[in-house]
Amino acid sequence: MIIMELKVSHRAALDLVAELGVREVMGRGSFRAWGIRQKN
């Protein structure tokens, strides 16, 4: 989804996800919930 929306490479999308600390917290299929890890 990030690749299509932002028109970036697969590697850039992975780097962005890692930098933001985004993780999938639940869900499968069409329903998913996402969270952002807080830095301590």
Image (tube, helix red, strand yellow):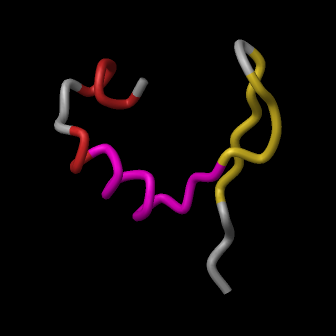
Which residue lies most toward the front here? Answer: 29
Q: Which residue is at 31% across, 57% downward?
A: 15
Q: Is residue 6 left or right of residue 23?
A: left
Query: Is 32 above or below relative to 37?
Result: above
Q: Is residue 8 magenta?
A: no
> How many circles with numbers are drawn on the protein?
0
> Quarter holding the N terminus?
top left
Q: Quadrant of residue 33?
A: top right
Which residue lies most toward the top here? Answer: 30
Q: Which residue is at 22% across, 48% downward?
A: 12
Query: Is 13 above or below relative to 29?
Result: below
Q: Is residue 17 magenta?
A: yes
Q: Is residue 32 left or right of residue 12?
A: right
Tell me which secondary structure the magenta stretch mostly adopts.
helix
- x and y percent of residue 13 in the render? 31, 44
Q: Which residue is at 54% across, 62% downward?
A: 21
Which residue lies most toward the bottom here? Answer: 40
- x and y percent of residue 32 in the render? 74, 27
- x and y percent of residue 11 in the render? 22, 49
Query: Is 27 above or below relative to 17?
Result: above
Q: Is residue 29 left or right of residue 4?
A: right
The magenta-colored residue range is: 13-23
> Quarter holding the C terminus?
bottom right
